[in-house]
Amino acid sequence: MNANRKALNAYGSASLEHQLESASPHRLVVMLFDGVIKSINAAKFQMGQGNIAEKGKSISKAVAIIEEGLRLSLDKTAGGELAENLDALYEYAAYQLLMANMKNDKLILDQILALMNDLRESWLSIDPVLGAANTTQVDSPVVAGVLNYGRI
């Protein structure tokens, strides 16, 4: 299964197939963050409604996007320390989501939601399509390794 298909499955929506195929690597990463954020928000709502089964499904979906989309897209060789740090951060986020599910803890969901929103904004800030003013070059080995152009 190619990485685009794996990311699509992790995101869970066949209607996004065209967007995934035509999206830049930056946009793909942002779309994965969008999926995690949407799933965490759904879990928070379901937690508030006392819908334990649906809360679990939403958290599981967020974890799958993190593990099968964000973590698998990292190239630790080309991305070096930045990719290693992101991998550890993604691992932490997935673990915390599992703890939030087990403990029915909205505070943990809020913390991981804030983290995912911050990471999403960081990716947007280095998106060359948006023309964001920054000093990071998209074709730098670090950014290329994190995005892993060949695998997402």
Image (spheres, rainbow, N blue to C red):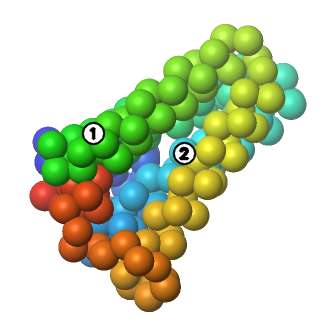
Quick check: 29 above or below 38? below
Number of numbered labels in the structure image: 2
Quick check: 54 above or below 137? above
Report the disc number at residue 98.
none
Q: Position of residue 83 (x, y in %)?
A: 31, 44
Q: Position of residue 76 (x, y in %)?
A: 22, 41
Residue at left 65%, top 37%? Answer: 112
Q: Position of residue 123 (x, y in %)?
A: 46, 64
- What amino acid is found at the position of numbered circle 2 in the picture? Val
Q: Is residue 21 visible?
A: no
Secondary structure of the residue carrying tag 1 is: loop
Density class for disc 1 (Cα within 10 Å; few <14, some 14-19, many ≥20) is some
Residue at left 67%, top 43%? Answer: 113
The part of the image, by quadrant, that contains residue 100 is top right
134 vs 48, left or right, is left
Q: Mark 2 and 1 residues: CB-CB less than 8 Å, in contact?
A: no
- What amino acid is found at the position of numbered circle 1 in the picture? Leu
Going by the picture, which residue comes out furthest to the top? Answer: 102
Quick check: 5 above or below 47? below
36 vs 103, left or right, is left
Residue closer to the observer: 152 or 130: 130
The part of the image, by quadrant, that contains residue 140 is bottom left
The part of the image, by quadrant, that contains residue 85 is top left
Q: Is residue 65 visible?
A: yes
Report the disc number at residue 36.
2
Of the two numbered discs 2 and 1 on the same chain, state the one appearing first in sequence.
2
Residue at left 53%, top 37%? Answer: 62
Q: CA distance from mark 2 to mark 1?
A: 15 Å
Q: Which residue is mark 1?
A: 72
Residue at left 61%, top 54%? Answer: 118
Density class for disc 2 (Cα within 10 Å; few <14, some 14-19, many ≥20) is many
Front label number (2 vs 1): 1
